[in-house]
Amino acid sequence: MAERSEAQHVDEMGEQALAEYFEANKDNPEVWQQKGRRIRARRGPSTVFQMRIAPDELEEITRAANGNVSEFMRTAALEKARHMAGKADVVETVRRRARELAEAVEQL
């Protein structure tokens, strides 16, 4: 039988056992060390928003977002909202004009 990982062991503990485990390991950096992730600091207030989404759709979005679903959803929603409001992103405008220029050059 395969040996259980430390994480699997901790997942199976009851509340009292967890308390004892963490008390015994309170000075063990391997238990507490986490890999950090850079986040973008937001200025001003923000709101937490919930939405219902199918598990397979969330999995697809998570893969496309490379794990940062919040930023991915925020960016996608803002791009769509700005586009629908007639305020297309500057990058999209530049891309469109570059395509138009390339088509004009081909016609020369």
Image (cartoon, rainbow, N blue to C red):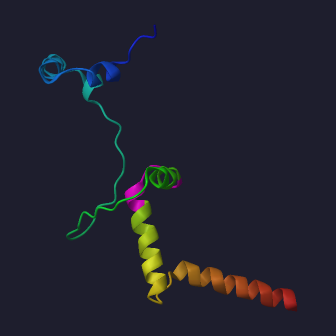
Above or below, 54 relative to 36:
below
Q: Is residue 107 magenta?
A: no
Query: In this image, 10 relative to 83: left or right?
Result: left
Q: Which residue appears at 33% of the width and 62% of the height?
A: 51
The span shown in magenta is 64-71
Q: Which residue appears at 48% of the width and 90% of the height?
A: 86
Quadrant where the C terminus is found in the figure? bottom right
Above or below, 59 relative to 1:
below
* Residue 32 placement (x, y as % from top left): 25, 29
Q: From this viewpoint, which residue is outermost toward the right?
A: 108
Quarter of the view holding residue 103: bottom right
How many marks do you count on the picture?
0
Q: From this viewpoint, which residue is outermost toward the top?
A: 1
Relative depth, front residue between 9 and 68? 9
Relative depth, front residue between 63 and 45? 63
Query: In this image, 46 relative to 58: left or right?
Result: left
Above or below, 76 relative to 10:
below
* Residue 41 placement (x, y as % from top left): 29, 61
Query: In this image, 20 relative to 106: left or right?
Result: left
* Residue 15 placement (x, y as % from top left): 14, 24
Query: In this image, 91 relative to 99: left or right?
Result: left
Above or below, 104 relative to 5:
below
Relative depth, front residue between 55 and 66? 55
* Residue 63 placement (x, y as % from top left): 52, 50
Relative depth, front residue between 4 and 36? 4
Quarter of the view holding residue 21: top left
Q: Which residue appears at 35% of the width and 60% of the height?
A: 52
